[in-house]
Image (cartoon, grey):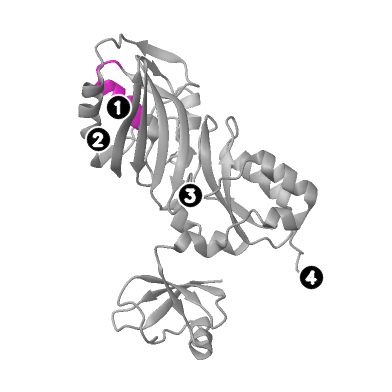
C-alpha cells in the first residue's frame, strides 16, 4: 500500500497573527491554515477567545522549533475591572461578588504591584486547560466540580501601572510562560481589598516579537493576500530562524555541515564557548540549532 500523500502546500515560516476578539487560538489557526492551504501548522501558546494580540503561527519546518516560542517570555496589556469578581476571572463569567472601589488610589495600586514582581507561586484557575486525571479543568468547572490544584512557580519580570480610572485600572505585564493573567488580575484585586477580573487583554510580545517593532498580521490582511495567491500569502511570513535571535549564528564549512547532518559533533573554529547556536551552511541557508559541548565541539540539537 503506497504512502498517503499529505494534503496542502509545503509552507515554511512564521506568521505573527494579530488574533481577533472572540476566536479561540485553535479556530484562528485553522482559519489561517486553510487560507494558506498549508500541509502543517501549529500555534505557540493559547490566547483566550476574549483576548487579542500576538499569536505566532508556525508553518512546516518551523513547527520543529515552536518550543522556543512556547517557552518565551510574554507581555500583555491588561484592563482590570475592580470591584467585581467573576466565576472565570474574566468578563465572560458570572458575577460572584462585588465591592466598593472608592478607596483605591494609584499609590495603593503601585504598592500592591511591587509585591507581585519576582518569582511567585500561582494557583491555576479552574477555568483553564490544565489537566487533572486526564480531564481539562475547564470541563470539570463547567460540570460544577472543583478539584485541588498544585500551585506553579512563575516569574513576573515587570508590572507597570498605565492608568487608573475607577473602577478600571490598566497595567503592563511582563511574565514567564505559564502565567495566568486572569489569576494575576484576581489576586491584585484581592490585595486591593475589592476583587477584580480581566475586562480586556492584549498580548503585545512573545519572545523576540514585539508590537511596534514587529508587524502583526490581521485576518483582513490574510484574506486580501489569499485573493492574490500563494506568493502574496507567503510574503507575510517571517523566516523560521527569526525566533532564535537569542542564539549566536555559526556558519559551517561543507564538511562540518555534512558531519553535523549525520548527527556527529564537530569542532568549529571561533564558535562560542557555551549555549545554543544557529547553524548555517556556506551559502547562508539555515540548517537548525546546535549546542556547545563541554569540550568545545558543536552537537546538533535540532535540524531541519
Residues at marks 3 and 2, CA–CA distance in whole angstroms: 28 Å
Going from N to C along the chain, the mark reached first, 3 or 1, is 1
Mark 1 vs mark 4, foreground winner is: 1
Q: Which residue is mark 1?
A: 187
* Magenta stretch holds residue 188: yes
Q: Which mark is residue 2?
A: 4
Which region shows up in magenta?
184-194
Alpha-carbon distance for marks 2 and 1? 9 Å
In the picture as drawn, the residue positioned furthest to the bottom comes out as 255
Q: Earlier in the sequence, mark 1 or mark 4?
A: 4
Pointer 1 with pointer 4, Cβ within 8 A: no
Q: Residue at x 30, y 22 (%)?
A: 189
Cβ–Cβ under 8 Å for marks 3 and 4: no
| Inter-mark Cα distance, 1 to 4 | 57 Å
Tell me whether the residue at label 3 lies in contact with that at label 1, contact meaning CB atoms closer than 8 angstroms. no
Front one among 257 and 217? 217
Does residue 203 appear anywhere in the picture?
Answer: yes
- Residue 213: mark: 3
The reply to whether dot 2 and dot 4 touch (C-beta < 8 Å) is no
Q: In the rendering, which numbered label is found on residue 116?
A: 2
From the viewer's perspective, is the residue at label 3 or at label 1 nearer? Answer: 3
Q: Are marks 2 and 1 in contact (CB under 8 Å)?
A: yes
Kind of element beneath mark 1: helix
Mark 2 or 1, which is nearer the eye?
Answer: 2
SS at mark 2 in the image: loop
Mark 3 lies on a secondary structure that is loop
Amino acid at each position: 500500500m503506497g504512502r498517503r500523500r499529505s494534503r496542502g502546500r509545503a509552507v515554511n515560516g512564521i506568521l505573527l497573527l494579530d488574533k481577533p476578539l472572540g476566536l479561540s487560538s485553535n479556530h484562528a489557526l485553522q482559519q489561517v491554515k486553510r487560507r494558506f492551504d498549508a500541509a502543517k501548522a501549529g500555534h505557540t501558546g493559547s490566547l483566550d477567545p476574549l483576548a487579542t494580540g500576538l499569536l505566532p503561527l508556525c508553518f512546516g519546518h518551523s513547527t520543529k522549533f515552536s518550543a522556543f516560542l512556547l517557552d518565551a517570555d510574554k507581555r500583555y496589556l491588561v484592563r482590570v475591572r475592580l470591584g467585581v469578581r467573576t466565576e472565570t476571572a474574566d468578563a465572560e463569567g458570572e458575577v460572584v461578588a462585588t465591592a466598593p472601589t472608592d478607596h483605591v488610589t494609584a499609590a495603593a495600586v503601585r504598592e500592591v504591584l511591587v509585591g507581585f514582581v519576582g518569582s511567585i507561586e500561582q494557583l491555576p484557575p479552574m477555568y483553564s486547560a490544565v489537566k487533572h486525571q486526564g480531564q481539562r479543568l475547564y470541563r470539570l468547572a463547567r460540570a460544577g466540580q472543583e478539584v485541588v490544584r498544585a500551585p506553579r512557580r512563575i516569574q513576573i519580570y515587570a508590572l507597570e501601572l498605565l492608568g487608573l480610572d475607577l473602577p478600571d485600572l490598566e497595567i503592563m505585564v511582563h511574565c514567564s510562560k505559564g502565567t495566568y493573567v486572569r489569576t494575576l488580575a484576581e489576586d491584585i484585586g484581592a490585595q486591593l481589598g475589592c476583587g477584580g477580573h480581566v475586562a480586556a487583554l492584549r498580548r503585545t510580545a512573545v519572545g523576540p516579537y514585539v508590537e511596534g517593532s514587529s508587524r502583526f498580521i490581521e485576518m483582513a490582511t490574510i484574506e486580501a493576500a489569499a485573493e492574490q495567491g500563494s506568493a502574496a500569502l507567503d510574503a507575510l511570513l517571517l523566516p523560521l530562524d527569526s525566533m532564535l535571535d537569542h542564539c549566536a549564528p555559526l556558519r559551517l564549512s561543507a564538511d562540518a555541515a555534512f558531519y553535523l547532518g549525520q548527527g556527529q559533533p564537530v569542532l568549529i573554529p571561533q564558535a562560542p564557548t557555551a549555549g545554543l547556536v544557529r547553524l548555517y551552511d556556506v551559502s547562508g541557508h539555515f540548517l537548525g540549532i546546535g549546542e556547545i559541548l563541554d569540550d568545545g565541539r558543536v552537537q546538533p540539537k535540532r535540524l531541519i
